[in-house]
Amino acid sequence: MFNKLCYNGTVSCVNVPNVSLTFFSQGANKMNEFLTSRQVILRVVTIISVVEFSIMDGFIYMDANLSPYIEALLDILLLAILTTPLIYLWVINPYIRARDNAHDQMEQLILKDVLTDLSNRHVVYSNIEKSIAASAKGDVNSAIMLFDLHGLKSVNERFGHDAGDTVLVETASRLRSQLGAEDIAGRLNGDEFVMIINHAKTGEQQAREDVMTLADQLIKAVFEPINVNGQKLHVSGSVGVKLLGEGDSDSDKVMHDADVALTQAKNKAGDGNIVIFDA
């Protein structure tokens, strides 16, 4: 379930889901919902046979003494009228449902992080561009928060990667629960999350106070014990913040600034540090 990322000749498993394998395995499950060629042929033949038998039986019962030509025309007409809705309901409609389900799932995989169900990197960067544009116009006061989860490696080593997965999923849920409806939460890599805040107060000082309060809430929410198989696990985190302004125009630069702030927060003594980027 994990990709092993190697650094300096050592192996460090950071709970990065193998998206490609998950994608194909889930895609295969959805493909099982599609009718096979044999099933399609069997259903169509069954429908036509039953309807045709009923039509011929009706002709015999009516004993109308129709000419072969008229009887053939009626047979074709009745067969078309009666089999079309049955074929649609029993063959075509199941295909449409399976196709739509597969499409929805593939779209979900494209837009979401497989493990946590948060937005993935592509969606995050797309929304950062929108927030930058909105902030430049003065429509909203936005900020980018990077959250680095501390203690995940220890959880993986002591309790296994399943426990690490549980911690990641619960952390993602807690982070999202602290955000507003207009905000975006995403996962960038194994233990790093990003939040796009689109409801910060106007005015730089008020915005700084607002995001500091929110960042503190995020850290406190994550610090609460996580129950995994009867074990109460503790993790913490650091937060780096970049307030968006009129001078911001590039999502990569904005993320770099937020990452600089996060690095400064991580380098401070203790856990739960928050740093806002200052140019």
Image: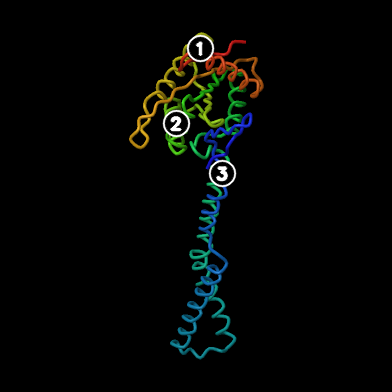
Locate residue 131: give its quadrant.
Answer: top right
Question: Which comes sooner in the sequence, label 1 or label 3?
Answer: 3
Asked if residue 218 is positioned above or below residue 60 in the image, the reply reads above
Q: Nearer the viewer, mark 1 or mark 2?
A: 2
Q: Nearer the viewer, residue 166 or 52?
A: 166
Question: Which comes sooner in the sequence, label 3 or label 2?
Answer: 3
Image location of residue 242, percent across then percent down:
57, 17
Asked if residue 240 is positioned above or below residue 165 in the image, the reply reads above
Kind of residue at disc 1: Arg
Asked if residue 117 is positioned above or below residue 219 in the image, the reply reads below
* Numbered mark located on residue 107 in the image: 3
Pointer 3 with pointer 2, Cβ within 8 A:
no
Residue at horizontal 60 percent and vertical 15 percent from the top:
245
Locate residue 58: give its quadrant.
Answer: bottom left
Kind of residue at disc 3: Glu
Mark 3: secondary structure: helix
Kind of residue at disc 2: Val
Q: Which residue is mark 1?
A: 208
Pointer 1 with pointer 3, Cβ within 8 A:
no
Label 1 CA crowd tier, 10 Å (few <14, some 14–19, many 20+): some
Mark 1: secondary structure: helix
- Colour approach in the figure: rainbow
Q: Which residue is mark 2?
A: 155
Residue at horizontal 53 percent and vertical 17 percent from the top:
266
Distance from the alpha carbon under mark 1 to that under mark 2: 33 Å
Mark 2: secondary structure: helix
Image location of residue 33, percent across then percent down:
51, 58
Image location of residue 158, percent across then percent down:
43, 32
Label 2 CA crowd tier, 10 Å (few <14, some 14–19, many 20+): some
Is residue 279 rendered to the left or right of residue 56?
Answer: right
Is residue 255 rendered to the left or right of residue 227?
Answer: right
Distance from the alpha carbon under mark 1 to that under mark 3: 36 Å
